[in-house]
Image (cartoon, rainbow, N blue to C red):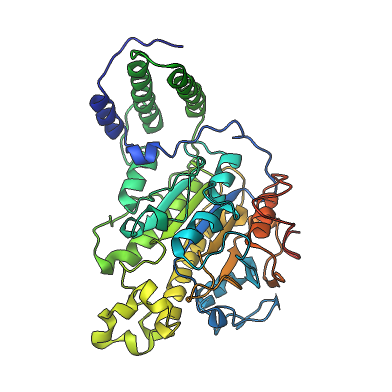
Amino acid sequence: MNFLKHKMKRRDFLRTMAKAGLTTAFASQFAFSPNVFAAAGDARRFVMVYYPNGCSREKWHAYETGGLGAGSLADSPLSPLDSHINNLVPIKNLTFAGHGGSSGHPEACRAVFSGGVDGAPSFDSEIGNALGGTLTNNLHVGCWSSKAKGSEYMPFTNINGNKIDVPDNPQMIYDNLLADVVNGGNQSETSPEDLRRNRVLESLHENLDLLQANSLNVTQQGKLLTHEESLNYYQNVLNSSLDIGDGTGFSRPTVGMSGLNEEAEAVAQAQMRNIAMAFQANVTRTASFQFMGAQDESLQINFPSIRPYMGDYGSGDKLYWNQTRSHVSSHDESDVFNSQTLWYNMMVAYLMDQLASRPDTAYGGTLLDNTLILVMSEVGGGNHQQENPGIYLAGGAGNAINKGIAIDANNAGMSNLYLDIANAFGLGWNNYGNSFGGVNGLLV
């Protein structure tokens, strides 16, 4: 082991990490994978978007299978995606049954997102681990996810199968990930990237030295060796460069996580921009976005952008009734519930706009050209059904999938879709979770 000269107390280490622009939650996202340079197919970047409590499936699926065109989505909560219809693949007749599905929200969150394997890493973490990233293998961001009833209502798990508490503050995400990448007028001789790398490495090395000074048993020594190997790998990664082109399109979010209901739409949009900026800077190739937690009752989804679609709850005192909360409205499957799923898709459309407007400095074209987006919930219908869930794929995906069509999955399982997505990235997986093949008509 490399015994380093400088010693420090743990509280000093945490303080140094804070000065480095990292929180402990963010630091935990660094996954050091030997597969960081795994073979990639045509798709290059992946975003997994979670929305809670399912949808009114009859309304969500109010489109015909086959080629999509003008008006195909007019009667569906997918209508905000109409401008990106050529990069859209809505999917009917998938099933969660046998693939992690459950009538209980916590039980579904334990297995639906990991291909039916209870407590395994969620699919986004598996993809992030396989693809790797420059600074983090998987960027997790959220909107009101911190208001979840508990960790069991969280959909995403890390590579060790532990639930991920997704950060909601867009300003914190930007400050941790991008503030030093974008110079912001600081014209020092040392680049912002190098300054940040030096601070982070100093913090990590000093903490390692502190651990080495302790008497450790065999198991602890093994963990320490793994930590050192990861640190050495990370030092090599930090020698690489982040390419942000001419630096345009990068800006710190104007909104944080105040907890004010009326700011939630701005928070969601800021997090979508954070994903786009992280992709543009090539910080990561995988990102996950979480709208709240399962069975959520914290956020009133009553924003001006969707009030024309909310029926009786779109004006007056009813704007603030409990029915404007996701879980409460889900069991009614009313206009207000449809307006909520419409809002989720408005935010995804905003993400697609952001990706389409930014160059992909690593792979060419725009970020949207190379990105595959999966949008899904933990249950199918608002009454906990497991059949025909509201799911779609979006993005150019490097032309690895057929786009501009609606597909009938013929009761294929969710794990089958995961398997096809993995192979759209050229990962060559033979199975994933409880998969028994793919989804006919999806892959090119």
In the rendered image, the vertical position of residue 190 relative to residue 250, given as above or below: above
Q: Residue at x 45, y 64 (%)?
A: 105
Nearest the eye: 312 or 401: 312
Residue 47: percent from the left, percent from the top? 53, 54
Q: Position of residue 422 (x, y in %)?
A: 66, 50
Report whether 69 appears left or right of 315: right
Quarter of the image that includes the C terminus: bottom right
Residue at position x 54%, y 82% from top? 59
Residue 142, percent from left and from top: 39, 56
**In the image, 89: left or right of 190?**
right
Query: Does residue 384 appear in the picture of this structure?
Result: yes
Report the front residue among 353 and 391.
391
User: In the displayed image of the protein, which residue is found farthest to the bottom?
Assistant: 312
Residue 269 falls in image quadrant:
bottom left
Visible in this render: residue 398? no
Q: Residue at x 38, y 49 (%)?
A: 165
Q: Quadrant of residue 202?
A: top left
Instruction: Judge left or right: residue 200 versus residue 218.
Output: left
Q: How many marks?
A: 0
Residue drawn at x 55%, y 78% is: 57
Residue 89: give x, y in percent of width and height: 64, 68
Q: Indicate whether 329 appears above or below 220.
A: below
